Image (cartoon, rainbow, N blue to C red):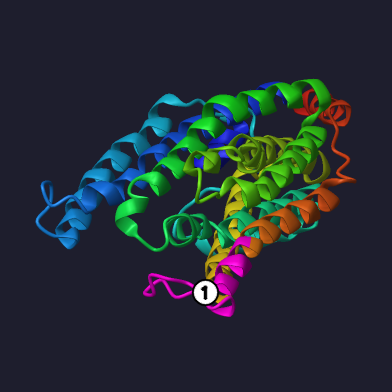
Amino acid sequence: PLIGLGYEMTTDYNERTRLMAFSQTVGQIAWMIVPWFWVLIANPNLFETQAIGVRQLSIIVGAICMVLGLMPAFFCKGLDASRMENRKEITFHTLFSNLIDLFKGIVQVSKNKPFMKLCGATFLVFNGFQMVASFSYFIIVFYMFKGDYGLAGNWPAWFSTISAMVTAFLVIPIISRLANKFGKRNAFILSTAISIVGYVLKWWGFNPDNPWLMFMPLPLMAFGIGGLFTLMMSMTADVCDLDELKNGMPRKEGTFGAIYWWMVKLGQAIALVLGGLVLKLVGFDQNEAIQTTETIIQLRIADIVIPALTAALAIMVMWKYDLTEAKAKEITSALVKRRGEL
C-alpha cells in the first residue's frame, strides 16, 4: 500500500522523480544509523550481553517504526477516488472473485514490457550490490587490519554511514537534476555507468597503508543505488499510466508495487545465498584471523567484478527502454481527456 500510494501521489512526470528522490533521501537516514547499532550492542556499558542489547534495541526500533509507518496513511494524499471506475468491493462474499481479478491484473502487469525491463534492471543492480554487501566489511577487517577487529574499530561502520550520507545528500539531488534535464532512462544509464567506475576504484581504495582511501570510491559507487530506486520508482509510476491507457480502470499501482518489491525481496534472498557461496568458493573463513593471500585477492576481485558486471547488464536491459518524457506526457493527456483529472 505504501508503494502504491507513492506512485499515485502526483501525475506530473518530473515531480514523480523529485518525490521519489525525497523518499529515498529519507530512507538513507536509516542506513546512516543502522551500522552503529552493532557498536551500541557490543558496548558493555550499555548492555550486559549482546543478546540483551539486540532484544532491547529491537523493541525500541520496532516502536519507532510503528509510529513512523502510520504517518503516510494519515498525512499523504492519493488520487481522487471519486473518479475511479471498476473498483471492487472487498467483503468475504467477494473474496474469491477479487482473487481472480488480482491474478488477471498480475498477468496484465507481467505483459507490460517497460515494467519488465524496470524489474530486470533493478534485479541486476540491487542484487549485484547485495551479493557483495558484506564483502567490504571482511576486506576492511581481514585485508586492511589483518583480522584484528580491535584495530578495525569503527572503520566498517563509518564506511557504511559515509556511503549513505553521500547517497542521500550528494548523489540523489544530482540524479534528480539529471533526470529532469536528460530524461529518466538516460539518467539511469549514466548513473549506473558512473557506479561501475566506483566499483573498479575499490581496488585502490582498500589500502592497508592509508585507510582513508576507502572513502574515495564512495561518491561514484553511490550513483548505483542512489539512482536505482529514485528513477525506477518514478518510471514505474509512468508505467501505471501506460497500463491504465491499455487496460482501463481500475488502476494497478498496488499490483505494480507488490510485484516490483516481491521481485526485489526474492532477489535479495537469492543474493544472500549466492554471496555466501562466493565466500565459500574463495575459501574465506571469518573464524580465521589470517586469510590466505589467494583468498583475499579473490574476495577483492569478486567485490568489484560482481556488482560491476550486473550493473553493465542492467544498462543493456534499459538501453531500449522507450517510455520517454514525451510519450509519458502524451499518455497522461490521453487519460485526462478520457476520464478527467484524478
Looking at the rendered structure, the secondary structure element under dot 1 is loop
Give residue 75's position: percent from left, percent from top. Answer: 41, 25
Which residue: 59% across, 37% down?
216
Q: Along the line of sight, which residue is nearer the eye, 38 or 294?
A: 294
Give residue 156's position: percent from left, percent from top. Answer: 42, 49
Quarter of the C terminus within the rendering: top right
The local crowd at label 1, few if under 14, some if 14 to 19, many if 20 or more residues have their Cα within 10 Å, is: some
- 74 displayed left or right of 331: left
- 252 displayed left or right of 145: right
Relative to 107, is 335 above or below?
A: above
User: Is residue 293 magenta-colored?
Assistant: yes
- 241 displayed left or right of 300: right
Q: Along the line of sight, which residue is nearer the eye, 81 or 175?
A: 175
Residue 341 appearing in the image? no
Magenta-drawn segment: 280-300
Residue 205, quarter of picture = top right
Q: Along the line of sight, which residue is nearer the eye, 148 or 254?
A: 148
- Circle 1 is placed at which residue position? 292
Which residue: 81% across, 38% down?
245
Residue 270, quarter of picture = bottom right
Q: Along the line of sight, which residue is nearer the eye, 65 or 300?
A: 300
Give residue 276's position: percent from left, percent from top. Answer: 52, 72
Q: What amino acid is found at the position of numbered circle 1 in the picture?
A: Thr
Which residue: 64% across, 52% down?
203
Give residue 83's position: percent from left, percent from top. Answer: 64, 28
- 331 displayed left or right of 201: right
Residue 277 appearing in the image? yes
Say how many tags the image has: 1
User: Is residue 267 magenta-colored?
Assistant: no
Which residue: 74% across, 48% down?
118
Relative to 64, is 281 above or below?
A: below
